[in-house]
Each structure stands twice: as C-alpha cells, then as structure tokens.
Image (cartoon, rainbow, N blue to C red):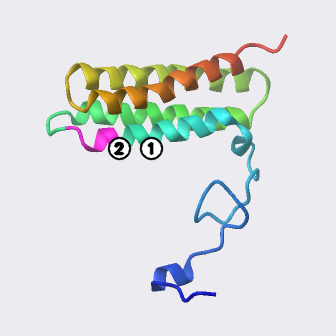
C-alpha cells in the first residue's frame, strides 16, 4: 500500500464501497434520499449553480443569494420528501419543484444580464429543468 501524500490524507476516513458521498462515513442507501434520482439532480444543480453565484460581479449579491437559496431549498425539500409519505411527501416535492423553477429564473436573469458565459448558464439550466420534470411526476397524487 502506498504511503499517504499528506497528513490529512492519512486521517481521512474510508467512506466504504461507493457511497456516492466521498469522505462521508455512511453507506450508500443509508437514507431514503440516497435512492431518489431527483435528489442527486438537485445536488448537482446546487453545486453548479453555486459555482456561478460565486463568480457573479460585485453588486449582484442579492441575485447570488437568491440563486443559492432556491437551489438549496430545492435540494433540501426533495430530500425531505423522500423521507415522508402521503400528503407530506407530495407537499415537499411540490415545494422543491417551485424552488427549482425559481432557481431557473435566477439563472435566466444571470444570462439576460450577461453576468456569466451563456454556455455555462445554459448547461446549468438543464439541471433545474430536469429536476422540475422529475418532481412533477413525483408530486402527482398516487390514486
């Protein structure tokens, strides 16, 4: 076994087999939201949107904050919905869908104002669009 390159690497916990969460000690599937594709898409949208928000020019802090809040809320509500049932589940998924739509609007504002490269924003917009489609299906009542 090769020697660790740094002291930090030597102390890093072994995350176990493919947890999907590098560096985290829990196992894949330990939580209901680990098994929901919509949550993974919401997480990817959060990461990509935050990268854009971090690079917005000075004076656009409100837009950056709104983008981050909408993406974080979409992620957290989708994860919360995975752990619920019945009307609570549907309510969380519908709320997450609304937040995903708001994050898309914030990204569109970034694009309209020319605050980030169009290609980067369009690629980021694919994720909330996909998330909205997934959450629409999940938020339909199971009749």
Q: Helix, strand, or loop for circle 2?
A: helix
Quarter of the view holding residue 109:
top left
- Label 2 Cα crowd, 10 Å radius (few <14 / some 14-19 / many 20+): some
What secondary structure predominates along the stretch shown in magenta? helix
Query: On screen, 61 above or below 10?
Result: above
Residue located 26% across and 32% down the image: 117
Residue 109 vertical placement versus 74 (above, below)? above
* Camera-nearest residue between 117 and 59: 117
Determine the residue located farthest toward the left in the rendered image.
59
The residue sitting at the top extreme is 143
Q: Name which residue lies at 28% across and 44% down.
A: 54
Q: Where in the figure is residue 84, as x and y percent of width and height?
A: 75, 33
Picture coordinates of residue 77 (x, y %)?
59, 33
Crowding at dot 1, Cα within 10 Å, few <14 / some 14-19 / many 20+, comes out as some
Q: Quadrant of the N terminus?
A: bottom right
Residue drawn at (56%, 24%) of the image: 130
Q: Quadrant of the C terminus?
A: top right
Q: Nearer the viewer, residue 102 or 8?
A: 8
Q: Which residue in the protein does label 1 denote? A: 47
Read off the magenta span.
51-56
Q: Can you say whether 95 is above or below 1 in the image?
A: above
Q: What's the distance in space between the residues labelled 1 and 2, CA to CA?
A: 6 Å
Kindly state the secondary structure of the residue where label 1 is placed: helix
**Looking at the image, which is closer to me, 95 or 75?**
75
| The label number, if any, that marks residue 21 in the structure image | none
Please state if 117 lies on the left or on the right of 121 as rendered.
left
- Rendering quarter of residue 67: top left
Image location (x, y in percent) of residue 134: 64, 23
Q: Name the mark on residue 51.
A: 2
Side (left or right) of 69 relative to 39: left
What x and y, as percent, mark residue 36?
70, 37
């Amino acid at each position: 076994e090769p020697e660790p390159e740094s002291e930090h690497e030597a102390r890093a916990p072994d995350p176990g087999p493919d947890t999907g969460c590098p560096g985290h000690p829990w196992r894949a599937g330990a939580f209901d939201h680990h098994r929901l594709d919509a949550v993974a898409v919401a997480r990817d949208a959060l990461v990509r949107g935050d990268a854009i928000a971090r690079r917005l020019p000075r004076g656009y802090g409100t837009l950056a904050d709104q983008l981050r809040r909408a993406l974080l809320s979409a992620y957290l509500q989708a994860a919360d919905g995975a752990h619920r049932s019945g009307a609570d589940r549907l309510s969380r998924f519908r709320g997450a869908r609304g937040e995903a739509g708001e994050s898309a609007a914030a990204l569109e504002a970034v694009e309209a104002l020319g605050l980030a490269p169009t290609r980067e924003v369009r690629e980021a917009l694919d994720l909330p669009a996909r998330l909205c489609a997934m959450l629409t299906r999940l938020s339909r009542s199971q009749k």
